[in-house]
């Protein structure tokens, strides 16, 4: 019973936080908004990253299959957005669709770091000599 109440409370907090994000939306900050290519850039980026990830995962077929499915889902969502310039990000329904896409992209990024990188012998690190 208590865990149900906590879930309900934190679910409410999450919804309120999402509404604050919608109220603070800044559609004029979207990349390539004036040319209405924001959505297209997301699709192109996902496609190129997918191709690279699958090429790198060629020796790990299970991982490659998982990555393919994750990218396919994200690309399908990105391609069905009806707002090429992300101008309607201040609309709660549109914002929800964009946030869902962002979550899928974040999940892919996590998989790249935690699964693909180590399978290649690569880890995330910091090099103080690289000039950044």
Image: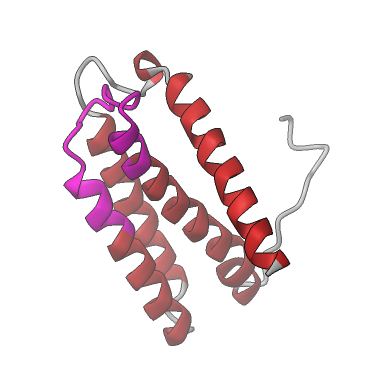
Question: Relative to the observer, which residue lies in front, 46 or 85?
Answer: 85
Q: Position of residue 84 (x, y in %)?
A: 20, 31
Q: 69 above or below 99?
A: below
Q: 89 above or below 78?
A: above
Which quadrant would the C terminus be assigned to in this image?
Answer: top right
Q: Is residue 91 left or right of residue 124?
A: left
Q: Position of residue 20 (x, y in %)?
A: 52, 26
Q: Position of residue 90 (x, y in %)?
A: 35, 23
Q: Is residue 82 in the magenta section?
A: yes
Single out the residue that lies furthest toward the front: 1
Q: Position of residue 50 (x, y in %)?
A: 36, 60
Residue at image point 19% right, 19% down: 35
Q: Is residue 53 left or right of residue 110?
A: left
Q: Is residue 100 left or right of residue 47?
A: right
Q: 75 above or below 96?
A: below
Occupied quadrant, residue 12: top right
Q: Is residue 59 left or right of residue 68?
A: right
Which quadrant would the N terminus be assigned to in this image?
Answer: bottom right
Residue at image point 46% right, 69% down: 56
Occupied quadrant, residue 65: bottom left
Region of the chain picked out in magenta, as a range: 74-97
Question: Relative to the observer, which residue lies in front, 35 or 51?
Answer: 35
Residue at image point 37% right, 48% down: 101
Single out the residue that lies furthest toward the right: 128
């Amino acid at each position: 019973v208590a865990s149900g109440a906590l879930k309900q409370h934190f679910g409410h907090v999450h919804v309120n936080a999402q509404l604050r994000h919608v109220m603070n939306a800044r559609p004029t900050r979207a990349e390539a908004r004036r040319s209405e290519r924001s959505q297209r850039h997301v699709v192109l980026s996902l496609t190129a990253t997918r191709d690279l990830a699958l090429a790198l995962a060629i020796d790990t077929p299970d991982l490659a299959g998982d990555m393919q499915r994750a990218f396919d889902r994200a690309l399908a969502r990105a391609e069905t957005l009806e707002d090429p310039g992300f101008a309607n990000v201040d609309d709660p329904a549109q914002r929800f669709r964009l946030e869902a896409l962002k979550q899928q992209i974040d999940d892919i990024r996590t998989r790249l770091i935690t699964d693909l990188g180590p399978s290649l012998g690569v880890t995330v690190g910091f090099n103080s000599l690289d000039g950044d």
